[in-house]
Image: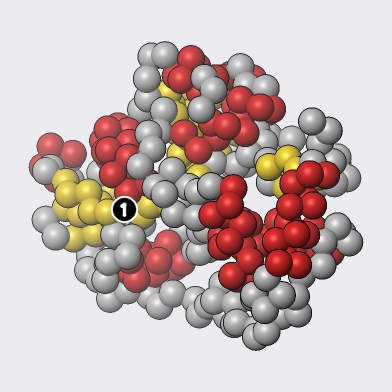
Amino acid sequence: MEAIWKYRGRILNDEQIEFIRTLIQANPQASRWSLSRRLCQAWNWVQANGAPCEMLCRGMMLALDRAGRIELPPVRRKNPNPLAERRSPARPLIDTTPLSATLADLRPLEFRLVRRTPEEAIFNGLIEHHHYLGYTQPVGEHLKYIVYADQRPIACLAWSSAPRHLAPRDRFIGWGPEARRQNIRFIAYNTRFLILPWVRVPHLASYILARMARLLPVDWQRLYRHPVYYLETFIDPERFRGTCYRAANWIPLGLTTGRGKNDHTFKPNRSLKEVLGYPLAANFRKLLQAPS
């Protein structure tokens, strides 16, 4: 099979592109949304939880249309972009009294999964106003947690699907392009970790990371119907040493190239980040290299 088109890991040949053309011609009154749903059904293109990959499919069809490979019907209506028009999260009204204690005095801690709950607005606001990177709305598979001590928020963690290309990680796992394409969904990426600035508790951060390594795979399996075998994150070595990750037995793997996921120049355009990984299973390499 000759690969002639590639979109976000999916490889198409002439026969598949011709199938899309035929689908469009056979449904002249169908909208772009309807065509993407029909194509997902025809190809059984679904996520691990059974939901069709409609957004990914629409993006692929739009790329083919712009490249002149297919001709989509005109846009019937332009929906507002909720990401572009999203307001910045408001600052939550919570107790900001300085908290200084030992970890033993603070426990037990409560880890709440807050995505799609009323508490998600608190999470978004805390990240926006207290994390140096601020809040950005994730896409795809992602989870958000607030850690509470005696009903008081003390920390936030965000997890999402992993970046596709990350050389230190791929070398560590032993990934080639095909194994990575098939199994990238089995990695969760820690995009944000915030201990609120008025909280001073020695060893709290590494304790939270250790607890998350046990909780996250259970929640991911329940919500997305597939396991997670490996965790990863980046740190900016110009700002942080990553002490809490190292204390929680995360493994330093090396530096990124500084080019970003959409680079086409092969030249650094941002600061280098240190990559750290945390295997969740002793045989993680075998699990991540197995055909899925």
In the image: residue 139, left or right of residue 212: right
Q: Compare residues 75 and 93 and report the one nearer the observer.
A: 75
Q: Compare residues 63 and 270 and report the one nearer the observer.
A: 63
On screen, 244 above or below 161?
Answer: above
How far from the left and from the top, in percent, is residue 280?
A: 37, 25
Residue depicted at x 54% and y 54%: 41
Q: Amino acid at mark 1?
A: Tyr
Q: Is residue 202 visible?
A: no
In the image: residue 78, left or right of residue 93: right
Give the quadrant of residue 83. Answer: bottom right
Location of the N terminus (image quadrant): top right
On screen, 130 above or below 141?
Answer: below
How far from the left and from the top, in percent, is residue 245?
A: 42, 32
- The local crowd at label 1, few if under 14, some if 14 to 19, many if 20 or more residues have their Cα within 10 Å, is many
Q: Is residue 81 visible?
A: yes
Q: Which residue, given by chain and number where applicable, does mark 1 sit on?
A: 145
Total marks shown come to 1
